Image (tube, rainbow, N blue to C red):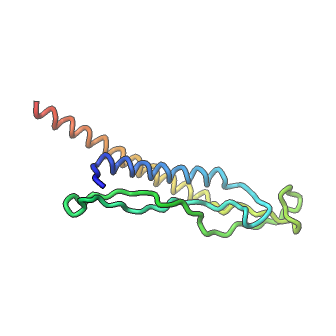
Amino acid sequence: MTMNVFDISGRAMSAQMLRLNTVASNLANANTVSTNKDDAYRAIRPVFEAEYSDQLQQTGLSTVNVSEVVKLDREVTRSFQPDHPLADSEGYIYESAVNTDEEMVEMMEASRQYQNTLEVVSTLRTLMAKTMRMGQ
């Protein structure tokens, strides 16, 4: 695969956008409950994998792809609430396995990565424009 810095940046920004979308999904489901343990919501995360340029030896270029989105292996919280409409026969509900503090940190990190990549592209465009003006 032939890549340039704009291809790499675009893919990096897309990966961070998917990361932000998974955080949004996790936060939206943070306080959900279920009748049973298996149906309770578990946080999800994208799994990234590097993709290298065909000319890696000459250019050193690589980018990132999201290979899959996985559920985190976390235990859901079992809470005794016999009056809840979703309580099981023993009076328990199962709360989602989402740590909102962790999700906020994940959101801030993904947002900063996205902004950093955007800044690189912006700086590169400015430098390219200045280089073009020098040749006139």
Q: Is 36 on the left-hand or right-hand side of 47?
A: right
Q: Nearer the viewer, residue 4 or 42?
A: 4
- In this view, the residue farthest toward the top is 136
**Residue 125 spot, x, y in % from top left:** 26, 39
Q: Is 134 on the left-hand or right-hand side of 43?
A: left
* Displayed quadrant of residue 72: bottom right
For the C terminus, the quadrant is top left
- 74 over 114 or under it: above or below: below
**Residue 40 spot, x, y in % from top left:** 71, 62
Q: Nearer the viewer, residue 17 or 2?
A: 2
* Displayed quadrant of residue 64: bottom left
Q: Residue at x 21, y 39 (%)?
A: 128
Q: Is 10 on the left-hand or right-hand side of 101?
A: left
For the N terminus, the quadrant is bottom left
**Residue 23 spot, x, y in % from top left:** 56, 53
Q: Residue at x 61, y 55 (%)?
A: 26
**Residue 109 spot, x, y in % from top left:** 46, 54
How many numbered discs? 0
* Displayed quadrant of residue 45: bottom right
Q: Residue at x 22, y 58 (%)?
A: 59
